[in-house]
Image (spheres, grey):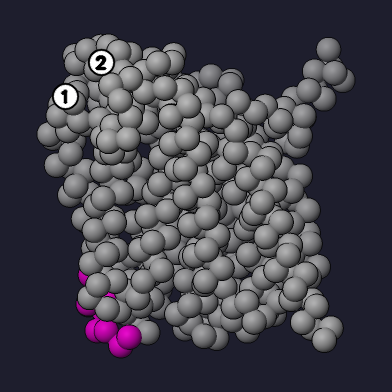
Amino acid sequence: MQKDRQFLLLRLAAGLSLLLALVNHLLPPKPFAMTQLLFDYQFGPVRRGMVGEILNLFTGDEVSRGEVYLAAAVITLAGAFGFYLLLKRLMPLELVGGWLLLILSLNSFAFASFVGNTGYLDGLLLALVALALASDGARVFGLMLRLVIAGLGVMVHENMLPYFTILIGFDLWLTGQRAGWSGARAFLAALAPAFVALAVLVVLTGAAAVQSGDAAAFAGYLEGKAAFWLDPTSTDVAGRSIGSNFALMAELRGTTKYRAWLLFDGLPLALMSLWLYWLAMRLMPKDEPWFTRLLLAGVLLAPISLNVIAFDVVRFGVASVLSGFLAIGLLIRHRPWARERLQAVLTWPHFLVVLVLNVNIFTIQINIGAFHVSQFPWILVTQLRWLMP
């Protein structure tokens, strides 16, 4: 009876964690995200244009603010519920440790930041990944679904390649070992999602209709389509080359604002990723193949590597942390002994320490909220100004 009551309370805590994360952080999106939802194929193939092309089926010639708000909410909610349902499916919920890790993920400042990126296409990417990983990768359908989603994700947003293709490959590697595939077959399966995504990205980039000289015309088309103000920096992205991104980042890295962003947002997210890597390593036996450890490191590092070429510090760190939680879930799915190890490593005191840190750390909110300015670590900026005027 006491044990049943304990699990009932844990189930309630998980549900409340998800509900409060959505209520606190699902706020109206910034114009940047709203503008990118309008990208479509009117000028031909363009990066991030698939969602706007689909949205055109439900809107008229003019897209209202309310329609974009609804689309933004649906995208973020799809990602949030996809993450929750997949991780809940992967966790050993017959054990307390499984519930603790699920609750921790929903209370992490990374998940709060993900919801706070309302309307960004990362939500749709996470929903697609959750759909793919819910199937059995050992079956032909499951394998093909993973590869199709790896390519489709790049059509939604090119960040699919570093965000989640290695995570999908990690799942296929573990699947192959569990199913008794040969080493070569499992190795190729693990690399296949990244190769498919890269191939689609190369084709899409080569066929891109909006180049740097066409960005102004594309922006004018979007302005005629929208019944609200557009963010010009968003339309610039459509025609910006990789070389231009490198040049832009070389300039931004020298600014105090960007360095503060790395310190107060990037560092806490990186430390959370490091803790997840440590936890996953504790779930593995000493004789675990080296490629498993390498893929796990890739799952966490690939999203963060985007900081070299782009400036969305929070989004990249969030993708790393959420992928880390899912990677641990995949380990538990494919490695039965990981269940008991999780129970031994994630004790109540350990869980409480990490939980307290997570619920008291806030990153920059991408949407209209600015709650982070009065919370740790950004409150330190205010404290320094007050103590050392």
Residue in the picture at 52% in, 71% down: 89
Can residue 57 be seen in the rendering of this structure? yes
User: In the rendered view, would you say 233 is above or below 49?
Assistant: above
Q: Position of residue 3 (x, y in %)?
A: 79, 83
Q: Main secondary structure of the magenta part?
A: helix
Quadrant housing the N terminus:
bottom right
Q: Is residue 199 left or right of 39 when viewed as pictured? A: left
Q: Which residue is mark 1?
A: 43
- Classify 10 Å Cα crowding around label 2: few (below 14), some (14-19), many (20 and above): some
71 within the magenta span: no
Q: Position of residue 368 (x, y in %)?
A: 60, 26
Q: Position of residue 49 (x, y in %)?
A: 27, 34
Q: Is residue 139 left or right of 324 when viewed as pictured? A: left
**Front residue (pair 166, 24):** 24
Return the disc, 1 or 2, that comes first in the chain's sequence. Answer: 1
Find numbered disc 1 in the image and state the secondary structure of the residue it sits on: loop
Count how many numbered circles sit on residues in the image.
Answer: 2
Contact between marks 1 and 2 (CB within 8 A): the answer is: yes
Residues rendered magenta in the picture: 179-189
Quadrant housing the C terminus:
top right
Find numbered disc 2 in the image and state the secondary structure of the residue it sits on: helix
Residue in the picture at 71% in, 30% down: 371
Q: Amino acid at mark 2?
A: Tyr
Task: Say the numbered circle drawn on residue 221.
Answer: 2
Q: Position of residue 261 (x, y in %)?
A: 59, 30
Separation of marks 1 and 2 at Cα, in angstroms = 9 Å
